Structures are given as structure tokens and as C-alpha cells.
Amino acid sequence: MKLRLLGPLVLASLAACHVVLLGDLDVGWDIDGSTSPTLCTTYNIDHWHVLADGPDRVSTDVPCSAAWDTGTVLYSVEEGYYDVTVEAVEQGTGTVLAAVVETNVRVISGDPPATPTIHFTASDFSAGELNVYWNINGTVDGKAKGVSWDTCDEVGAATAEVEVDGQPSTHDCHAGGNMSAALTGSSASQVRVRLLDSANSPLTTWSPLATADAVSGTSDTWEYVAEFNWDSFTTLKDTMRGDFDFDVSYEGQDCTQTSPNVAHQVVLLKLDGSAVNPSPDVCGPDSVCTPADGASFASCYGPGEKQTIADQLWREYKLKVSGALPDTASYEVCWEQEFDIIIGAKTNPTAELDVTRINSAGACAP
């Protein structure tokens, strides 16, 4: 019986034997080539956390004031390929200020230690103020950081979700009228934004992912502006309507200051190159309404005399405004200009349209 059992017992012993070969790993790091402890104060670094992840998973913490390497601490790890990460940990908060990874570091048994050096740069630590702005259908003055044309309330946006380097945070969409948020970022920060409703459901697509822009005259401030035009909205773009309010001047003058005087206004509203059909009405401050068909003559209204084209679908339109003489001059058009306009959500700011002269001959002569 003993002879019959001997063979299987030997085979079982061999099958259970697993030979582990060990090698050594010594990780070093620097900042822009320097390992000076004075950089600990410069960047407020308390210690370094080193992680080697591969056949083994080993880690250690090294004080920033000590030598910037692991020495013999990571010796005798299982041979193979490792991803090595070094993190700079902030004094007092424990926040990771910067992290760099080197992949496929090979540890071989019997060879000298593997000695990867992780290279940080000053820009990895250049955290500063990151100001993020968002506009809906542009701004009233056309400047990126001006007052938004449409408001968060008008479109039902409760919060703005801001993603910086893959980390999301939410902020009051209206933000007291500023429609902005101050965060922490760096020269390399990648930013994008989308608007959410009160149920935290997305109202818009994400704005383009892009690096924040440096603010002129500073070394630690960056900014990103998200523009949400009507077509950024996933469903509202097909249902939202609004009123377009505007007033008109003629090269900075009112109807009676021009030479000759402007007697009549003619308006044409176009969408995608064609006249809007049916033509909407343009209603003046006297509640008299005239079709915006490019052929109907209305009274001339000057600066400060608000006119309205009501209840139009969210879109980018073209609005042609003509200034014509009295019928005794056959309604000759002396002023005319076509404007790119946006009809935004609900009630819109009053657009100021200044029409230029196109004819100075004949009855149009000053």
C-alpha cells in the first residue's frame, strides 16, 4: 500500500510548489530636475506617497524633507512589470497636490534594482484661481463676460455642473446674476460645463472640453467661458418661444433729426434665408402693429421707442430694417440695414439697432 501511494504524494507536492522570484525597486523623483528640500516649502509639500502596483502592490510614504527616493524600502518585491505612482501630499490638508505615473517598470530577480525616476514640473503644482462663466444665447453687449442674453430662470436651469480635469461640481446657475463660479485650477486644467434642471437632469449638452485661458497680467488665474446657444438645449430648442424687443436709430439720430426726415419704417424678419411665414407683427409703443413682411409701411419710431416682435420660436434670425420717405417721395428708401439677431427665451433685453444710410441722391439727398 505504501508503494502504491508514494507516486501520487510526490506529484502532489510538486504541483503545490510555487516558486516566487524577488527583485528590488528603488524609486526616485524630482521637480524640474531638482531634489532640493526648499521646494517642499515652495509647494507646501508634507510628504510623498509612492505606490508600485504589479505582481505585488507595495507602497510607502517618504517625508519631503528626506532624500527623494525609496532607498531599500521597496526591495524584495515579486519580479514583473509595475505601474509606479508618486503623489505629492499637501502639508496640513492631506490633499494630493500633484501625481505622476510611470508605467511598465520592470523588476528582475538577481539584477541590480530597477531605478525609475519620476519627473514633476513646476506647472504640476501651479494651482490658482479658475473662474468659470456660462452664457445663454450670448450676452447683451456681445462680450464673453457680459450679462447673459437669457437667464437661468427663463430656461429652467437650477444648477451648472462644472467639470475640471474630470472632477464634477455643481453651482447655483444664476449665482446672484453673475452666472459664474470660482474654483481651483491650473494652467493645464481641462474644463467643460452643462446646465441641469431642478431634478439634476441635463438641459444642455456639455460645452466643448478645453483648457482654461490665462488671464492677462496674472500668473495664477485662469478662466473658461461656456456658451449655450439655443441649439445646445436638448428639448427646449424645439418648444421655447420669446419676444424680441428693439428700438431703432438712423446713424444715431431719431426720425426727425435725419435729413431728410424718416417718415416710415419697413421691417422684414427672415429665418434660414427666407421670410418668416406667416409674417409676424411688429408692434410699436403706441400698440399699432404692422406685418414684418418687408412691404408694409409703419410709422417711424426712434430711440427709446420700444418695438416688439412677439412669440417667436428660439432661433437666430435676420432682421432687415428700412427707413423710407413720405409717400410724396414714393416711399423712397434712404436707410437700410440687415441685422443678425437672436430671439431668446420669454422676455429679452431691448436690442438697439442703428440703421445706416444707403442713398444720398435725389429725394434722399441731405
Image: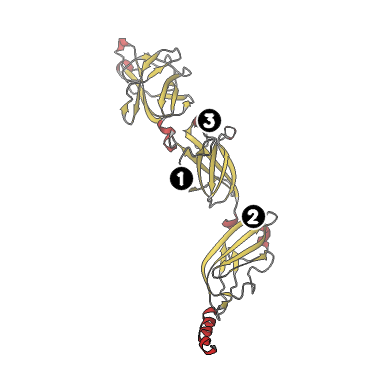
In the drawing, does residue 216 fall left or right of residue 275? right
Q: Which residue is located at x 44 percent, y 23 percent?
A: 243
Percent of width and height locating residue 206: 47, 43
**The disc label shown at residue 95, or none:** 2
| Amino acid type, residue under disc 3 in the picture | Asp
In the drawing, does residue 272 fall left or right of residue 124? left
- Rendered position, 136 above or below 114: above
Task: Please report whichever mark, 3 or 2, sits nearer to the chain's N-terminal start.
Answer: 2
Q: Tell me how far mark 3 sits from mark 1, CA to CA.
A: 23 Å
Towards the viewer: 79 or 267: 79
| Disc 3 to disc 1: CB gap under 8 Å | no
Residue tagged 3: 153
Percent of width and height locating residue 99: 58, 59
Q: Which residue is located at x 57 percent, y 32 percent?
A: 177
Residue tagged 1: 208
* Coloring basis for residues: secondary structure
Percent of width and height locating residue 81: 51, 71
- Rendered position, 140 above or below 180: above
Q: Residue furthest front?
A: 1
Task: Please report whichever mark, 3 or 1, sits nearer to the chain's N-terminal start.
Answer: 3
Image quadrant in which the C terminus is located: top left
Local secondary structure at mark 2? loop
Local secondary structure at mark 3? helix
In the drawing, does residue 232 fall left or right of residue 163? left
Q: Residue furthest bottom?
A: 3
Percent of width and height locating residue 108: 53, 77
